[in-house]
Image (cartoon, grey):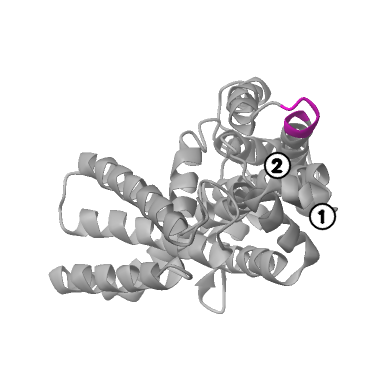
Amino acid sequence: MLRRPETTLLAVLLVLAVLIGIDNDLFWSPQNLTDIARSASFTFVVGVGTTFVLISGGLDLSVGSVYGFGGIVTGLALLAGWPTALSILAGVAAGAFIGLVNGAIVTQAKVPSVIVTLGMLFIVRGLVLVFSGGAPVYPLPDGFVSLGRGEILAVPTPIWVAAVVGVLGQLALSKTVFGRRVYHVGGNETAAYIAGVPVNRTRIIVFVLSGLTAAVGGILVAARIASAQPSSGTGLELQVIASVIIGGTSLFGGAGSVFGTLIGTLLIAVLNNGMIMMHIDPFYQSIVVGVIIVLAVAIDGWRRRRLGLA
């Protein structure tokens, strides 16, 4: 539990699923499990980038707005007659650019990431409203909509996209020099700098990744609902951060994994689905998630103390 908190979390997820399944056997129906996985895939894609930021010791509160911005940029490009692939590229590039701006301000102006990204949350949300005129962007072409509604081998396309993003993210963290640098920067920035790690460049890259994955998530949901909504992603940043923290990524930096984020995302998705199936008042869902977040941070603090990291 101390070294690999994801293992314990996976056991909790399985026990929770069994308990819900006992109460309502419809939980195990293929359609319901597919719906859970598909709804979790949008959050997970964004969570992959957020995992990098948190491990590096930063915080990105702008992902919800970038999520909506990526969808709006892509939608407007499609309506302007751009090819689908180029439109998607434009949306992804827009998200990456916002991440680049965040990273540049954090590293060059030495402003705390929570302040920078909080301001960017409002700036980008304003850009979404300006670009869209406050109205949904539609109709979107069938070729694009199939990205959110289509299936490959009977599995919804968003789940495949989330799987690819997750695998690439985990490999980058665990098998590359860049991944090791992210952990070093989050664990001890001063020691990383002395050891020759390009701290500023590493921080900029993780924010670019965060903006990029947020835009990808927004593009996927726009394809799913066949329109780019200006309100898309509102409040998403808290849900994503909750999933990442619950998944074992330390709020203090230096520890975490994409696999843990996957489990955390699924845990919240299963919990929400289970409460609906058990006819629990939806108003209690936020309370339950909030309690879990506090417990997750408290457990992380305890784990760090036991391992001598704090």
Q: Crowdedness of circle 1 by 10 Å Cα count: few (<14), some, many (20+)?
A: few
The N terminus: image quadrant: bottom left
What secondary structure is found at the residue carrying circle 1? loop
In the displayed orientation, state which residue is furthest to the front. Answer: 308
The answer to which of 264 and 198 lies nearer the viewer is 198
From mark 1 to mark 2, how far is it between C-alphas?
41 Å
| Res. 132 image quadrant | top right
**Residue at x 65%, y 50% (from the top left corner):** 186
The answer to which of 191 and 266 lies nearer the viewer is 191
The answer to which of 249 and 216 lies nearer the viewer is 249
Q: Nearer the viewer, mark 1 or mark 2?
A: 1
| Res. 264 image quadrant | bottom left
**Residue at x 68%, y 43% (from the top left corner):** 211
Q: Is residue 127 above or below residue 224?
A: above
Q: In this view, does 244 lie to the left or right of 177?
A: left
| Res. 165 image quadrant | bottom right
Residue 24 — which label? Answer: none
Q: Which residue lies under the disc numbered 2?
A: 74
**Residue at x 67%, y 69% (from the top left corner):** 174
Q: Give the range drawn in magenta.
A: 105-110
Residue 109 is covered by the magenta coloring: yes
Residue 270, how many percent across, how many down? 33, 61
